[in-house]
Image: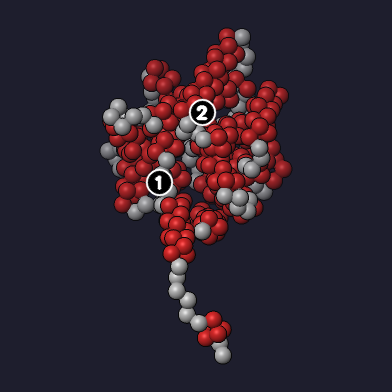
């Protein structure tokens, strides 16, 4: 006699039906978590800032515009690192709250970080005027995966220590940016310490700040006000350092303090704008939504830049000589293509590949089963 016949048919009790319903509802809510408007908008601002900065070599901007574009360029990479840290902090917070296994999430983040480095190396083969940020950003995320589950107080100590250690880093500007993956030790030295464009020593403190914000609740009004205050304090420190005649060369302490100020202030203001009251914030949120939409495909848009610049520089039409016209075409094409893709298709192609190869969907499904 089979086990089914031995047990016999059972009638579902009201308690079991209610439990099943609650379980399904919990999984459904977990699978349909709404996008964070402020976080996506901050990511969108970061990639838009990069697009604008990468259009500059086409034309000679007048001094006021050149100074403004310089600020936009300085904002892009630290804001990217900050948003990446917040995203990691949010995931770590969820895992800790649900008492789920930590190693699958940490492994997935580590694999994702390695993939960013690989994509950066591939994009670097396209010999353009773009300084690729993905290698140091990936290395920063790899270190972040190792510490994402530390207590917040330890993360704060680590962030302050990493920020202060930049005082000792005098490599940027004194060594060439000649990273070559065939020489691993030198490659690491360049992207960790000496690259004058992007380096782990400059990005890691901002990433850790984002990790802390994600762990404590980045969108809480008190946290946003504290982030804004930190950004203003960093701006004051930057101004003081300039007044004292300290080196402002890219990669040095004062320059990185300036990056911290820009990213902290912009992130806080965007978060405050996204959290405005329904009536007062309708227009503001309507302005943020297209930017946030672009932010959902930021990695694909970053790669798209290389393709469009190569086409416009090497195979551009005669009516687009070097000047402001190809710069405008480049910026509009990048933003329009990425916005349309996100609106009509959804996940960007590079994001899809990274999610599949890093096992993000498997980790997410495992978390949903744990919740259920």
The disc at residue 223 is 2
Residue 309: quarter of image: top left
Relative to residue 320, is residue 109 depicted above or below? below
**Residue visible at 42% across and 35% down in the picture:** 38
- Could you tell me which quadrant the N terminus lies in? bottom right
Residue that extends furthest to the bottom in the rendered view of this protein: 1
Q: Nearer the viewer, residue 244 or 181?
A: 244
The disc at residue 239 is none
- Label 2: few (<14), some or many (≥20) within 10 Å? some
Percent position of residue 224, x then y: 48, 27
State the SS at label 2.
helix
Percent position of residue 329, x then y: 31, 38
**Residue visible at 60% across and 52% down in the picture:** 100
Residue 328: quarter of image: top left
Residue holding disc 1: 34
Q: Is residue 191 visible?
A: yes
Drawn side of residue 51 relative to residue 252, left or right: left
Percent position of residue 44, x then y: 41, 37
Drawn side of residue 39 relative to residue 112, left or right: left
**Residue visible at 52% across and 25% down in the picture:** 227
Marks 2/1: CA–CA distance: 21 Å
Q: Nearer the viewer, residue 156 or 64?
A: 156
């Amino acid at each position: 006699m089979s086990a089914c016949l031995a047990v016999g048919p059972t009638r579902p009790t009201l308690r079991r039906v209610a439990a099943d319903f609650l379980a399904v509802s919990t999984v459904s809510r977990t699978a349909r978590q709404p996008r964070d408007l402020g976080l996506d908008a901050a990511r969108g601002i970061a990639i838009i800032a990069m697009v604008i900065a990468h259009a500059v070599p086409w034309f000679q901007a007048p001094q006021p515009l050149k100074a403004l574009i310089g600020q936009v360029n300085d904002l892009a990479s630290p804001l990217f690192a900050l948003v990446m840290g917040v995203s990691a902090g949010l995931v770590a917070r969820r895992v800790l709250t649900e008492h789920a296994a930590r190693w699958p999430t940490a492994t997935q983040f580590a694999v994702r970080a390695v993939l960013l480095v690989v994509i950066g190396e591939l994009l670097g083969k396209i010999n353009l005027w773009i300084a690729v940020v993905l290698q140091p950003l990936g290395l920063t995320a790899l270190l972040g995966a190792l510490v994402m589950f530390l207590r917040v107080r330890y993360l704060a100590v680590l962030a302050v220590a990493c920020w202060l250690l930049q005082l000792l880093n005098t490599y940027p500007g004194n060594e060439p940016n000649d990273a070559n993956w065939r020489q691993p030790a030198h490659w690491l030295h360049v992207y960790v310490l000496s690259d004058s464009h992007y380096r782990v020593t400059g990005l890691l403190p901002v990433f850790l700040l984002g990790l802390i914000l994600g762990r404590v609740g980045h969108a809480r009004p008190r946290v946003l006000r504290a982030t804004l205050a930190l950004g203003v304090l960093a701006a004051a420190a930057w101004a003081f350092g300039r007044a004292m005649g300290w080196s402002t060369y890219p990669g040095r302490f004062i320059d990185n303090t300036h990056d911290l100020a820009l990213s902290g202030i912009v992130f806080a203001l965007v978060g405050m704008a996204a959290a405005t009251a329904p009536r007062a914030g309708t227009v503001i949120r309507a302005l943020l939504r297209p930017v946030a939409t672009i932010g959902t495909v930021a990695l694909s848009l970053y790669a798209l830049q290389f393709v469009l610049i190569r086409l416009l520089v090497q195979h551009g039409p005669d009516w687009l000589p070097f000047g402001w016209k190809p710069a405008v075409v480049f910026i509009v094409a990048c933003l329009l293509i990425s916005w349309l893709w996100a609106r009509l298709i959804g996940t960007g192609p590079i994001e899809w590949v990274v999610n599949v190869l890093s096992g993000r969907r498997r980790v997410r499904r495992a978390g949903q089963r744990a919740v259920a």
